Amino acid sequence: MDITACGVTLAALMLTVLLLLFSWKARLRHSRLPPGPPALPFLGNTLQIDKRAPDQSLIKMSKKYGSVFTVWLGPRPAVVLCGFETVKEALVTRADNFGARGTVPSISKITNGYGIASSNGRRSLQLRSFAITALRNFGKERPTLEDFIQQEAKCLVDVFRRTKELPFDPTFQLTCATANIMCAVVFGNRFEYTDSKLLTLLDMITENMRVISSPWGQLYDLLPSILDYFPGPHNRLFENAAKIKGFLREMIQSHKEARTAGGPQDFTASFLSKMEEEKGDPRSEFNDENLLLSTFNLFLAGTDTTSSTMRWGILLFLKFPEGMIVIPVLASVLYDSSCWESPETFSPDRFLDEKGRLKEIEAFMPFSAGNRMCIGEKVAQMQLFLFLTALLQSFTLRSPMDPHAIDISPLSSGFSTLHRPYQLYCVPRKSA
């Protein structure tokens, strides 16, 4: 063996020893954490978690290691909470201890800790309290939020009707509809579905959700300090985020210039009023950067989650044409057999009382619970109900393929769940 080969072998051996030593020290430092599945040095448990359905992997682990256990996301430990009672205790009973937002490197690089979704401490308390109040008060006078959604539902039905009963992928139309509701909430206006600015914005949002939820996006969040020096899809994530923020800056500036006393109080107008009210307070969190990143949070969260849920709901209508569904989000709670009878069975009746009315179930928490509960819950619920109701009242939805052959498993699941593309055709109801 020549000197070069010996050097390479020695370097590889030293690197392996260093990685093992690093892994051993990390586990020793966190030795008081709850037990969990065995982890590989440096990689942790990442190979044991299905990238398409990480929630199902964690639920499966909980059956062996209990409702509280530790997994290693690369070199970082994370404590996993599963089941209704455990999640409720953390998010509701002990909300003050579990109310902080964990760091996601890709999101932190984009927001730098500003905005509603990724802030903590005093900033988070101020912004969340304001946002909840602003969304609750939005549209108390005409037009109300329901008026906006009803009008957008008519536009959506019209677009579906123009498909002339031919198969089509509804992703674009549903995303446009939910994006327009967020435009109404944040800026008080809407875009035509053919508007070039809207199309560019939605393309960037869609690409970012695809990247951040992909295995590459998850790898970046494990090794940000290394991948920052390499090319890859993560760079598109940050480029798109910069362009989206540029679009929002333009919208905010136009809002500032067009503001009038007593004008419509959408989210941006309310935030600008709060900025003016507290401009002399050095501790105030109502500033341009928090306004920009809060609108950024609302747009991305409000557009992708609601449109994705509607796509999922329609896909289930196609697969189970005679049924309804309420979409599970906190899967470990919604699959908890101690709270639900046959949790994996499609059974909409479980949500209805003996008179056929929707009943409240404590273990149903699709918008999370406690201090970090989704601030857009009411907006999302109203959109889901009004959009889907408008479509079902106007059309019979059919699938070009056998319902039994429909695959409802996601393409990937990470920061967001990416559902498989599909086609449907809309048969107008005679009364529509």
Image (cartoon, grey):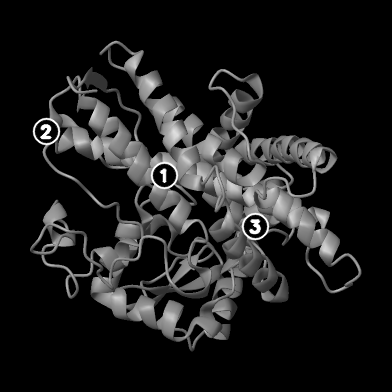
Q: Which residue is mark 2?
A: 404
* Label 1 crowd bin: few (<14), some (14–19), many (20+), radius 10 Å: many
Q: Is 220 left, or right, of 87 in this rendering? A: right
First reached walking from the N terminus: tag 3 or tag 1: 3
Above or below for 248 versus 67: above
Q: Is residue 66 visible?
A: no
In front here: 381 or 346?
381
Q: How many marks?
A: 3
Residue at 59%, 80% (x, y): give it.
Answer: 25
Tag 3 and tag 1, C-beta contact below 8 Å: no
Of the residues shown, which amino acid type is indicated by label 1? Gln
Above or below for 277 versus 426: below
Above or below for 126 versus 3: below
Q: Nearer the viewer, mark 2 or mark 3?
A: 2
Q: Is residue 127 visible?
A: yes
Q: Nearer the viewer, mark 2 or mark 1?
A: 1
Q: Which residue is mark 3?
A: 105
Of the residues shown, which amino acid type is indicated by label 3? Pro
What is the distance, in whole Å, between disc 2 and disc 1 at their CAs?
29 Å
Q: Which residue is mark 1?
A: 383
Residue at 17%, 35% (x, y): give it.
Answer: 319
- Tell me residue 413's x, y (percent): 41, 48
Residue at 60%, 59% (x, y): give it.
Answer: 104
In front here: 67 or 366?
366
Q: Nearer the viewer, mark 3 or mark 1?
A: 1
First reached walking from the N terminus: tag 2 or tag 1: 1
Of the residues shown, which amino acid type is indicated by label 2? His
- Tell me residue 203's x, y (percent): 57, 28
* Label 3 crowd bin: few (<14), some (14–19), many (20+), radius 10 Å: some
Q: SS for tag 3?
A: helix
- Tell me residue 75's x, y (percent): 56, 67
